[in-house]
Amino acid sequence: MTNSPFPGVTYVKAPERSASGDSASVEALVSEIIANVREHGDSAVRDYSVRFDKSDISVFEVTPAEREAALAALDPQTRKDTEFAIANVRKFAEAQLATILPLEVETLPGVHLGHRVIPIQRVGCYVPGGRYPLLSAPIMTIVPAKVAGVDEVIACLPPNAHNAMIAGCVLSGADRIFKVGGAQAIAAMAYGTETIPAVNKIVGPGNAFVNEAKRQVFGPVGIDQLAGPSEIFVVADSSGDAEMIATDLLAQAEHDVRTCVGLITTDRALAEATLREVEAQLQTLSTANTAREAWIKYGEITVCEDEATMIAYSDLVAAEHLQVHTVDAQGFATKLRNYGSLFIGELASVVYSDKCSGTNHTLPTMGAGAYTGGLWVGSYVKIATHQWLDERGVAQVAPPAARQSASEGLEGHRRAAQLRLDRMQAKKSA
């Protein structure tokens, strides 16, 4: 047992390293890639595909024949499962979209304000190759975009990605698919090349180079978020099940050697039992090489002196995925505020959301859950305001607007505010 810097928290298993932060070398290389792609277009993309992906292809876009071939080669059960996941993600996205309503309101007599819900015109979805063919990845970025009404959805995935990933993009509704990966894909979607169109917003997770590229191109295009390594934490009281908790932690740890996993509990016995259970399960887990390294470097188990401390520490961590294993899980969940997505009760495993239950698995990491949620259908629309006034409205807002402009020394503003009022008054006097 060692004390944590957080008051009232003791480590049963402390992380050896922090997973946050990318090196300066990544930043410099990505800057070079973006500059070259922006200047040389397809030629630079092709060079980087050879350099990083060992793939020398002359045509980046997946042809209609290749789309059909990928679908034909997809295992029938895998296709059914993929379509099941798509249906669930679509259903939830449609329900979310139904809550985003246009607005018209008369705030003062004659002053009419409102907003429209406008789909983004063209979105670029980065679909990572990763260690495994993550068939859910295109579903989570492409399906909500189509539900939102985006005009054109562009998907980019590494040229060596599994063919099933192409099939997943097709089934999810991608309008165009390009076999381009890494930072060069982000640059191509941000600025456009001879064959890859520039988009208005880029979404989707990726490695450190993809993440850094999204950071650097932000401005000319929008991005969803900057995503770090995956995270899962479980908050639990004495009712927690050590075997179940350990299983869920390792399910995420197998993603990547930098995955952050942890248990936050008020029960020391559960903490120690979970530590033993993780070690035991690693002996039989086929992906233990990855999961063990993540566990050693970034895994943690903490014991909190009381429930209030457990809540406060969880909110400080602001985990990407947060599972609640307490006696009153529903009630406890209402006390938590910082997380990417919440999994209430021991039956709600992160893996269901990762794959097919319907909530989006593209979520904030590295503490960003303190100020934002994850990718959702609202990420693909703009809320754009408008106003219109009649003479009653001008009579009410013009005088204070003119006075305020004058006090600020903005004569042009004062004239613009006053002109309409003067004309109205002159019209009445005529």
Image: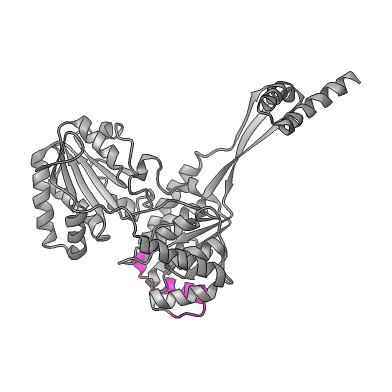
Query: Residue 279, position in %: x, y?
Result: 10, 56
Total numbered badges shown on the rendered structure = 0
Quarter of the figure that contains the C terminus: top right
Q: Position of residue 406 (x, y in %)?
A: 70, 26
The boundaries of the magenta stretch are 56-78
Q: Residue at x 12, y 57 (%)?
A: 281
Please say whether residue 71 is one of the residues in the magenta stretch. yes
Q: Nearer the viewer, residue 79 or 55?
A: 55
The quadrant in which residue 345 appears is: top left
Front position in the image: 65 or 212:
212
> Position of 313 compared to 103: left or right?
left
Give the image quarter of residue 134.
bottom left
Can residue 321 be seen here? The reply is yes
205 is higher (above) or lower (below) than 49 = above
Q: Nearer the viewer, residue 271 or 40?
A: 40
Examine the rendered structure and indicate whether residue 326 appears above or below residue 404.
below
Write the residue at 29% across / 37% down.
315
Question: Do we see residue 207 in this rendering?
Answer: no
Q: Is residue 190 left or right of residue 135?
A: right
The N terminus, quarter of image = top left
Left or right side of 399 for 259: left
> Foreground: 226 or 86?
226
Residue closest to the far top: 429
At 12% across and 37% down in the image, what residue appears? 267
Residue at the extreme right of the image, as rendered: 430
Is residue 28 one of those drawn in magenta?
no
Q: Whole-percent x and y of residue 377?
A: 48, 48
